[in-house]
Amino acid sequence: MPSVTYKAGGEGLERELTVEIHEQDATPWGADAVLRLVGGEHPRPDGPAKATGAARYTYDVARPRLAYAGSLLCPYAHARLKDIDEAGARAVPGVLDVRVNRGEYRHAGQAVAVVCAENEHALGDGLRALKATYEVLPAAVTVEDALKPGAAEVEPGKGNREVDARRGRQGDPGAFAKAFEASAVQVEAEFRTQIQTHSAFEPHGSLSDPGSGGEAVVFASTQATSAFQGLGRNLGLDGPARVIADHVGGGFGAKFGPMSGDQAAAEFARKLQRPVKYMCTRREEHLVGGNRPDSIQRLKLGGTKDGEITAFGGVSDGTAGNGTGGAGAANTIVYRLGAQDMEQGAVRTFTARGAAFRAPGHPQGSFALEGMLDLYAAKAGLDPLEVRRKNDRHPLRALQWQIGAEKLGWSTWRKTKPGAGKGPVKRGVGCAAARWGNPGGGKWNVEVAIARDASVTVRNAAQDIGTGTKSVLQIVVAEELGCDLARVNVTIADTRFPPGPGSGGSTTAPSLAPAAREAGLRAREQLEGLLAVEWSTEPSKVRLEKGLFRGPGGKKASFEEACGLIGEQGLSVTGQRRDNWKSADGLGETAGCQFAQVAVDVETGVVRVERVVAVHDCGRVINALSARNQVNGGVIQGISYALFEERRLDRAQGDMVNPTLDTYRITGMADCPTIDVVLTSVVSGFNNMGVMGLGEPATVPTAAAVAGAVFHATGAQVRELPMTPDRVLAALARRPS
Amino acid sequence: MKAFALLRPSTAAGAVKALAEGGAVAHAVALKANGIDLLDRMKERVDEPERVVSLTSATGLSELTARGDGSLTIGALVTLQMLADSADVQRLAPSLAKAAGLAASPQLRRRATLGGNLAQHTRCGYYRHLSFSCLKRGAEACPVRAETGVQDTAGIFGNSVCASAHPSSVAPVLGSLGAVVHVEGPGGVRVVPFPDLWAQPERGRASDLSLAAGDVITAIEIPPLPGSMGFGYEEVRVKAAFDWALVSAAVRIHGGAGKVSGGSIWLGSVAPTPLRAVAAEALLSGSVTEALAEKVGAAAAEGATPLAGTTYKVQLVKVAVKRALLEAAGRPA
């Protein structure tokens, strides 16, 4: 294996790094690499199609003889079917098939029956004709109700609470108790976060087409085309199905494998030998499309008078629905917290399963952890930013705090006393931190094909869920080939192409970009080889410089001229995602921080976010435009979490009262603040690109920063999300006068 | 949605006739303006009419006329955006222009009509989804009122039977302006004073209007409002973009900040129908100071019967009325 020494890092944290790389791999670009396209601002190639409506999402796919499937959803948290008029539904004109799922239903939204029909109206008529009646059983749909003595048990005999499997109990209870007792400053508080539903523009769904003699194909709105290949079994195929996801209308962690509706549709398709589409209704999407578990975090923090945290502990309880996975709150990360004792409880309720949601566990943990730091700072009479800096342990974040504080004017703002100024609108600022870190991986292949007409095609099975994956591949390949961006067509999201990763954990760019780079390099070498023959020289004597291939004796050729030498059959090469370098010292943890400025109307409790400064690290930036877009999106979704989004269930029935996009409030344009995005570029030492993911960390600290700003503006800390007028007014009323 | 026959009469009289065919049974026939609310309900199958009578082809319903005497006649199909943009409305009834311009989203304002806005049904989630029971849809009790109900947007007045809140934010403004409603029905044309337009909730009654199923609102008329008037409108909502008001308040006063001699105060989103704040109106006299505005706001909130989840809305009523009054007096808070 060749050994390479290069300059990793960035932003003043550069260092020489020697790594062993695969002999086929491209030499890593260091922090000092001069690149033509990578790192610039480039509109994404699918932008015009998306903006004009030409982009075809799964929801839009039409096929000859297409049939539609949908579910009757159980309206109760816990029930058994009493009666259902299956025959009545079958008799509805246009209804093709009906499947009843008998048994016990353990959450509202569970599919009681699935109907397949000629069109959406007949589908609705068929579902309506089922006239199901239920025997309603005891249930508990909130953490508090599920923990009451005598509460109905989701899994009888097991109790409703478990210590969360993943985060569990950490720390040393004895050491924590001692350190907390001994600390000069002690704070205790309870923080609550809500259930946030996945509300992507495009709901979950798919279209299964058995092909009727031709090739079977599945179109899916998914974060992993590969995960839908298993529908081949439901479709009656011998092997995996071909899956296409040309455009995906968003995915935040809940769109991986098929849901029961997708499976039912594939089975109807097989039986009827015609294509069947199943798209969740908006209500269904809210109910069963996945959600971020809630939390009740009862915390204690001890520290010194000058801002050093010496003890941190407590208990968090949250519900991930009728399962327990993912209910913990990531409330012990980012800072040095001294002696710790933290228990993460997972509470089963009669509600639909939670799902991974953009930085699972982090926003809820961040809200409580940063809230504790704000309380501590207030009690100790310290600047909240200084408390953070003092206990931070990431070298890059020290710089980020400084950048953000200067951009926002933190020190000037903090001179304002809570509640100061005339009129009912009070302003303040807050800040919070994020960490992430996943260099990606997997042995993925990216194919690059070039035709004689100089058109370049990049192929991989991975999907672009809106994050800009197509743009990333286009830029990296064009950079290596020395050609215009417009020459490179990215055709991905089809499992006929080389396998690609699922898009989760902010890993798509770091998993695919290094393979794309290697493929681009391989293709360029082929062009150099053709030119070497043409120029009767050695391939090593042909070099790409400033957009032109140059050879001995002043010979030169443009990319287009070089492509003219390609044979009729074209040229096709593959690049592989090599393993992350073991020899890397690795800045494996990315850093970020955000500052928020808010205006709080203390008479109405209405909060408006006026400005957010978001400073984030994602290793090497590939497309500054789409990277900023990711951060903007993270901040906007974070504001939504801070102020608006909340699943509201009727506590008796367990069904959702606000399952529409006008009553389940989500940040709109008029609610978006000025967002300043600063990307600190620190080349990670893991792969030939030095790229890291960005999708998740950008949404982690927003709610906490907004809450800190509300605290500063009013002197009242709102400890429950979302910070709606009722909660803000209640916090103001509790404020000591 | 369920299949239906679409009827498109060319006049309001034709619409009245079309509604009457088949006996104008409340649930079998529906009157549609631009369909913003009705189509939502039909998609949820809360409404499953066999016949839909659309007013969109009827002539003469989209006109906005300002007369020399200062009166305004607003056709039932005039959109909220037309109201917001109209120089006449901005001059003669600025509170109406303001409320219309804040409603819903830019797209919806360009489709939503004034008649449709008055006829819209409550946004209560229990009413809007068949999975819940609802008094308005025939259930014996209102589940919002139960201790386990979701109450944050519920009504705080007149909520003993049904805790719904009327969602229109322009309706309280029309109330404050003393509007009258032109209605065409099987018995001919009539004029309904604004307070008489509304019906209190009762079991099985979905509409909040007192009108019969065969009636068509053709226009809303705002009478001449003599000089020396002040207008105010204030709403509190969670989001700045596309959201429903938690509370809205419309105020019209005689005289200016220095000397007020009476006026009108109406509230929105606090009761099953738009609500006149009579006790608060009685205090509208003298100089409009911050102190008077506080007092008037407090009076508007008197008699509220909030549920556990809506106590905060009492405070919002006080603030919204105070601010609307200060705006009407030309001294916004």
Image (tube, coloured by chain):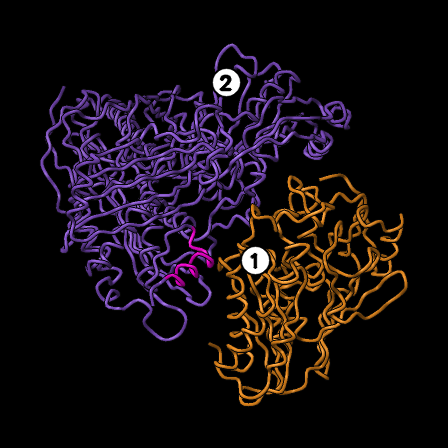
Q: Amino acid at mark 2?
A: Ala
Residue at numbered disc 2: A241
What's the chain of the residue with tag 2? A
Between A603 and A691, the one nearer to me in the picture: A603
Local crowd size for mark 1, using a 10 Å CA cut-off: few (<14), some (14–19), many (≥20): many
**Residue B209 forms part of the magenta stretch:** no
Residue appearing at x 59%, y 78% in the figure: B231
Residue appearing at x 60%, y 71% in the figure: B97
Whole-percent x, y for residue A391 in the image: 17, 47
- In-image side of A362 versus B300 (left or right): left
Is residue A210 at all visible to an observer of this figure?
yes
Which quadrant of the rendered structure holds the C terminus of chain A? Answer: bottom left
Among the chains pictured, the one given purple colouring is A
Between B198 and B239, the one nearer to me in the picture: B198
Vertical comparison of A553 with A713: above or below: above
Whole-percent x, y for residue A489 in the image: 40, 33
Specify the segment rendered in magenta. A722-734
Residue at numbered disc 1: B244
Q: Amino acid at mark 1?
A: Trp
Q: CA distance from mark 1 to mark 2?
A: 45 Å
Label 1 secondary element: loop
Between A106 and A245, the one nearer to me in the picture: A106
Q: Circles 1 and 2: CB distance less than 8 Å?
A: no
Whole-percent x, y for residue A427 in the image: 34, 66
